[in-house]
Amino acid sequence: MSSTTFGVISPHPPIFVPGVGGSRAHTTQASLDALGAMAEALAAFGPESLVIMSPHAPAVADGIAVDDSESFSGSLGQFGDPSAYHWPGDPVLAHAILSELEHAGIPCLPRSAGPRLKAGWLDHATIVPLSFLDPSQRHPIVIMSLSYLSYESHRLAGRAVRAAADRTGRRIAFIASGDMSHRLTPDAPAGYSPRAVDLDTEIRSLVEQGALSQLMHIDPDLVDAGGECGLRSFITLGGYAGEDPVPTRVLAYEGPWGVGYLSALVGAEALAACDTRGFQRTPETGHKGGMAGDDRSEIVALARTTITNHLQGHADAHPPALSDADYPARAGTFVSLHRGGGLRGCIGTILPTQDTLAKEVMANAIQAAFHDPRFPPLSAEELADLEISVDVLHEPESCTIDELDPKRYGVVTSSGWRRGLLLPDLEGVDDVTTQVAIAMQKAGIRPGEPCSYERFRVDRYT
C-alpha cells in the first residue's frame, strides 16, 4: 500500500467562484480561505494526478462510472460564468481504477461507454473545487461518479483507487467533492428539516475524529432528512485513506444559504503539507467554522453562555478565565449576532474597557443581544438558530487612506471627538471608498470634513 495519503473534502457551490458569485462569495470567506490553504498544501505535496469523485458527474444507478478521457472541458455557463475550463486526463490511471473495481466485484464502466455519460465533460461539482485547488489547470484528472450502490461498495471503491495508484506508481490526491445537508434553514433550496443540523454535526464529528468508516453507519433516516449530496464521496475518500483513525483536520464549516459546506484535509501527508495554524487565528484567515448553537471556539461559547444566562436571569458574578494562552489579556472586542443570514445585533469596543478579555466579551455580548438600538431585545426562542461571532481587535494604528484594505483591515475614521468604526471583511464592502464612507457616516462625519484614519486587524472566531 502506498505510504502517501492526501485527501480533500471540498464543497462545490458555484457561488464560490468569482465569475458566478462576485462579492457574495465572501459570505463564505472561511470556506474560501480553507480552499486557498488546501491549494497551497496540494502544490507542496506535488501530486502526479488528481482523482475526484463528483456527485453531479453523469452516472448510472447500478455501477460506478470512471471517465477515461484524455482531456476534459466545461464551464459554469448555466450559473452565469461562461469561462472555459480545461484539464488533461489520465487514461492509464482511469483504466487501472476500472480494473481494480472489477477485481473487487464492484459494477463499473467507463464514461466513454455511451454518449449519455458525456465523456470528457466537466460538471460544476468538479469545476468548483478544481478551480481553487488546481487553478493552473495542469494536473491530469480522473473523474469518478457516484452510484446507488451500497455505502460499503463506495468504501471498497476508495480502496480500489488506492490499489490503482500503487499499481501505476502514481502519486495522487483524492478530492471528495460534496455538500452537506441542503435543508438547514427555512429558505434552503431543498426545504427545511430541523434534523438537518444534526446530520451535519454527525458527519463533521466523524471527520474530526478520523472515523471515516463510521460514515457508513449514520442513521438512514437522518441522512434522508438532511438531503445531502456528499456522503458517498466522503465514504469513498475514507476507503482510499485506510483504516481508522485517519489523520484529519476540518478547516471550515459554514451554512449561510441553507446548505452545509465542509472543508477538510485527510491523510498524514495532507496535514503535513498545510500550515493549519492560520485556522485558529490569523488576520487574513481568522475564521473558524461552526454552526448555530455548536460553538467551536472558547470565546464564542463564552458569549453564548453569557446571553443564555442573562435570558434565564442568572448573573455571572465570577467571569471564567479563558484557557487559551494565545488570547490577549485585554483587548477591544465586537460581538456579532446573526439569524437566518441576517444581522441580529452587533456591539463592541475599539479599545478594552474591562480588566480582562473575558469580561470584555461578556459585556459586549449583553449589549449586542439586548441593547443594540437597531433591534428589539433577543428572546429565548431565538437562541436555537443564533449564530455568534467574536472579533478580537488588535490595537489600531494610524494610516493613510492608501494603506487601507477592507478585506484585511478594519478602519476607524475620526474628526475631533467623532469616531466611526467598521470591521474588516464584511459582505458588500469590497473597496476602500465604500469602507471609509460607511465608517464616516457612522461617526456623523460629512464628506469633505477633515478626517484621520486608523486601521486595525482582527482575530475572528465563529
Image: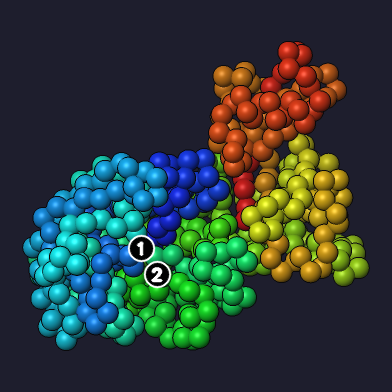
Q: Residue 459's image quarter?
A: top right
Q: Which residue is mark 2?
A: 230
Could you say whether the residue bearing mark 2 is in a helix, strand or loop? Answer: loop
Image quarter hosting the C terminus:
bottom right
Residue 94 visible from this viewpoint: no
Q: Please tell me the numbered disc located at residue 397.
A: none
Q: Residue at x 34, y 49 (%)?
A: 76
- Tell me: residue 415, above or below residue 263: above
Let me know if residue 351 appears in the view.
yes
Find residue 32 and report its horizontal and vertical position in percent: 46, 49
Q: Residue at x 32, y 65 (%)?
A: 56
**Mark 2: which amino acid?**
Gly
Which residue is more in the foreground, 322 or 421? 421
Q: Amino acid at mark 1?
A: Ser
| Residue 396: percent from left, percent from top | 69, 30
**As rendered, which of 453 and 136 lies closer to the eye?**
136
Q: Position of residue 117 (x, y in %)?
A: 20, 67
Give the left or right position of residue 241, taking residue 89 as reference. right
Return the mark for residue 177.
Answer: 1
Contact (Cβ within 8 Å) of mark 2 with mark 1? yes
